[in-house]
Image: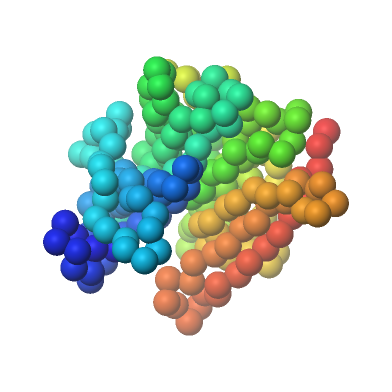
Amino acid sequence: MVDASGRPIDRKWDVDAEGFAVKDGVATVGFERDQRVAQFKIDPDNMKAPVRQLDCLVPARELRQNRGFETVAHANPYGQHAGGLVVVSEGVSTYQAMSTPLSSKGRTKASSPSSATAISTLPTVPSCRTATCCLERSFSIARGVKMRLRRIYGGSVEKGALADGPVLMEAGMGYQIENLEGLDVWTRDDGAPMLSLISDDNHSILQRNLYLEFILHQD
């Protein structure tokens, strides 16, 4: 990433990118520490500074320093947000849907200390046309890392609402999991909807970079 003059930015504080979504040649990136959501025009031969910075419904002062705009995704084009951006902040469990003409802010379910670390829409599953898959993570010294996958229905992502949905799976340190922070949804050649998860080892000898795949079975 480069600054307005085209020089690479070396300070982690300034480019702590966490959320990432691509549409029509534009990458939307959510940052923490220096809390913001910026858009870049994708040009592998001539990457430049952001073309714009989006106005956010969640004031930066409400976000924790290292737990900000953790995840960014485009809503399903057939849902109520019509392909608009959905941004979830980690530290305060707040989501916002930025779409035209609808903009809204609400809360994710807070039934446990889990925080959202990634979201992805489920466009390949007819019965989940307006649903989002949310990857959540929690940590404590006593029990270590836990992860949870939850389906959030598009109808609950609206102003003042509590975004909620069924838990697809939960796992703790008794399973082969790690500090999972990345999620993508894709379709296998045989038509099976797949969930891909990836972890961040934080440059620690106690953690691993781990890649997991799951088949999403429907009810």
For the residue pair 143 and 86, the one nearer the viewer reads as 86
**Up-down: is 22 above or below 161?**
below
Residue 48 figure quarter: bottom left
Q: What's the residue at 14%, 61% (across, down)?
A: 5
For the point 85% across and 51% down, the residue is 190
> Which is more toward the observer, 135 or 144?
135
Please provide percent x and percent y for residue 143. Answer: 56, 60
Q: Quadrant of the N terminus?
A: bottom left
Is residue 18 visible to us here?
yes
- Residue at the far left in the pictured view: 5
Coordinates of residue 2 in the picture (x, y in percent) = 24, 63
Residue 74 vs residue 26: left or right?
right
Q: Nearer the viewer, residue 62 or 110?
A: 62
Q: Residue at x 42, y 26 (%)?
A: 99
The image shows residue 20 at horizontal and vertical percentages of: 44, 51
Residue name at image x 40 percent, y 64 percent:
44
Looking at the image, the residue that sits furthest to the bottom is 205
Q: How is the image coloured?
A: rainbow
Report the label total. 0
Res 104 visible: no
Q: Where is residue 134 in the image (x, y as percent from the top left)?
A: 57, 42
Quarter holding the C terminus?
A: top right
